[in-house]
Amino acid sequence: MDKLYIWKINGLELDLDMEDADTAERYSSAVRILAEADEIRNKDIDYSSAIRQYCAIFRKFYDFLFGGGTSEKIFDGIKDNRRKYDAVYESLLDFIRTQRLESDNRLSRMVQRYAPKKAKK
């Protein structure tokens, strides 16, 4: 499969094709899980517990998106650390953004290539 559809993170290679409707739907559902991270900020709990819950939400997100056990592999050797979990998520978002840009560019190139040429006057 084209490298554009393989997210490489912490030694793993995970298939993610955001141009596939089923994948896009699964991603949209997974993003709803992340809404729980905002709720943690409103809880009256100690900071270390908030960090652990925050990281647990992201593990749930990746397991939902890629399948059970994936988060364990992604975060192997990484303790609950908000900054490190955010860096992994940022990597995913950048990967998806790159896919989106390439998709848009591919469409633009097709339109330019096959659009009718204007007649010279």
Image (tube, rainbow, N blue to C red):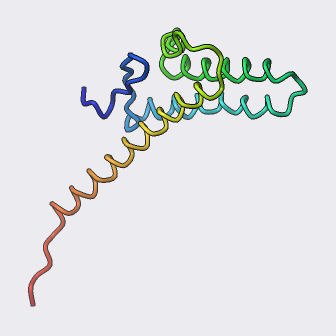
Height in image: 89 above or below 114? Answer: above
Q: Position of residue 39 (x, y in %)?
A: 79, 32
Q: Position of residue 25 (x, y in %)?
A: 51, 33
- The furthest residue to the bottom: 121
The foreground one among 41 and 107 is 41
Q: Position of residue 91 (x, y in %)?
A: 47, 33
Q: Position of residue 118 (x, y in %)?
A: 14, 78
Q: How many marks?
A: 0
Q: Residue at x 48, y 19 (%)?
A: 66
Q: Residue at x 21, y 56 (%)?
A: 110
Height in image: 38 above or below 113? Answer: above
Q: Residue at x 78, y 23 (%)?
A: 50
- Left or right, 116 with respect to 84, comes to left
Q: Give the quarter of the figure containing the C terminus.
A: bottom left
Q: Give the quarter of the figure containing the N terminus.
A: top left
Specify the quadrant of the image occupied by residue 46: top right
Height in image: 116 above or below 15? Answer: below
- The furthest residue to the left: 120
